[in-house]
Image (cartoon, helix red, strand yellow):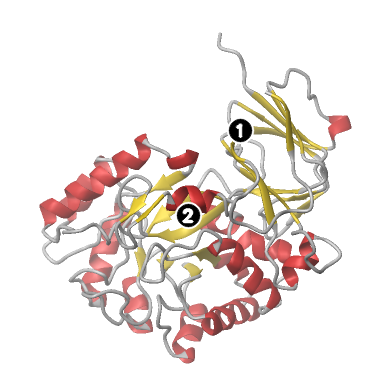
Amino acid sequence: MPETEKLVIRNIGLMLSGLIEDPILEADCIIAENGKISAIGREKDLNTDGATTTVDAHGVTLAPGLIDSHIHPVVGDYTPRQQQLHWIDSTLHGGVTTLISAGEVHMPGRPRDVVGLKAMAIASQRWYENFRPSGVKVHAGAPVIEHGMVEQDFKDLADAGVKLLGEVGLGTVKDGTTGKQMVDWARKYGIQSTIHTGGPSIPGSGLVDADMVLETGTDVVGHINGGHSALPDDQIICLCESCKAALEIVHNGNERAAILTLNTARELGKLDQVILGTDGPAGSGVQPLGILRMVALLSSMGGAPAEQAICFGTGNTSRQRKLDTGRLEVGMCADFVLMDQAQHAPGKDILESIQLGNLPGVGMTVIDGKATSQRSRNTPPAQRLPEIIVG
């Protein structure tokens, strides 16, 4: 029998669960075996024997690895949109361990015909299934729906392993009736859907207003705060009131509309529907720290406690997207970010510092129980750093 790979992270100063109903855990140690969380609690109560890797957290904070719910990958760790290499590796250094495609729309010569778009979606799903840039989990292969697609096309996609639709509205389907029919077909075969919300973002896209969002009925209201241009306030409020879908706030959107969405969701008791993305790479470029920046924005300007804002980019996304990561629970993937208050940043601790609008310093990321990066080259330097002492 192969040896069990056992990771023990001890001496954790603060453990954030990702669960919005219980964001802070009374624990200082977490154990993973063969890439899955096997125990959480106080070190004195846990069996830490037989560790193949031990990490001394030196009092820093441990949270689930961050999830970016809205990206536009193309191939490998390269984006032709900005002619940039290693953007996914840079994103890992921002504490993000999982990325979810909203469509591979920046592929040069992206096919619009049904055969071509299906082929590209299947290929995209395959190459990111077979290749994890710097260890990051990339859920890709998200076709943009076009006129001419029939139910069999969605079955074919699902049978081939495709689990996502790209943003409805970025292709030729720009009416709610057709969009709903195709979204319903996708849902029938287990494919999750997202819709573009707001004004046009790239040539070929167009306005998607609240009426179309509601009629189409996707699983995720993509960039409810605009990507880039937001809808009028009354339409954003209407979507928050009417949608049971995930309300996705993105970095590459309207910050004022982001705060409006947060405040409205809070008033409606729908904070569990709020999730975070960057909507990059895009015209705004790549945002390696985009999820951390959204956490700091929503905490400092939106009044969300920092531990709650972190749930928007972890556990909320995990639940809305039906993922096996993003929550500190036994049996979930051992994907973590270890971080600490940035050097010389104001605030009595990391949570207060974030609530003052400051980014934390990332000291390590872990994916499937293995360290994938150490001191971040992109965040401000942390006060303390975790240390691998065995393994």
Q: Can residue 195 be seen in the rendering of this structure?
A: yes
Q: Is residue 229 left or right of residue 64?
A: left
Amino acid under disc 2: Arg
* Location of residue 8 with respect to 349 vertically, above or below: above
Badge nearest the viewer, 1 or 2: 1
Q: Residue at x 18, y 50 (%)?
A: 118
Distance, label 1 to label 2, CA atoms, is 21 Å
Amino acid under disc 1: Gly
Q: Is residue 284 left or right of residue 257?
A: left
Quadrant of the rendered structure where residue 378 is?
bottom right
* Location of residue 138 with respect to 82 vertically, above or below: above
Q: Can residue 305 be seen in the rendering of this structure?
A: no
- Whichever of labels 1 and 2 marks the residue nearer the N terminus, that label is 2
Circle 1 sits on which residue? 369
Of 219 and 89, nearer the camera is 89
User: Which labelled disc corresponds to residue 126?
Assistant: none
Looking at the picture, how far across and down is residue 322, in whole percent? 49, 50
Q: Is residue 369 left or right of residue 211?
A: right
Of 369 and 260, nearer the camera is 369
Q: Secondary structure at mark 2?
A: helix
Mark 2 closeness class: few <14, some 14–19, many ≥20 residues within 10 Å: some
Q: Residue at x 63, y 48 (%)?
A: 327
Looking at the picture, how far across and down is residue 79, in whole percent? 33, 55
Q: Is residue 252 left or right of residue 129?
A: right
Of 299 and 17, nearer the camera is 299
Q: Secondary structure at mark 1?
A: loop
* Location of residue 254 with respect to 64 vertically, above or below: below
- In the rendered image, the quadrant that contains the N terminus is top right
User: Which labelled disc corresponds to residue 321?
Assistant: 2
- In the rendered image, the quadrant that contains the C terminus is top right
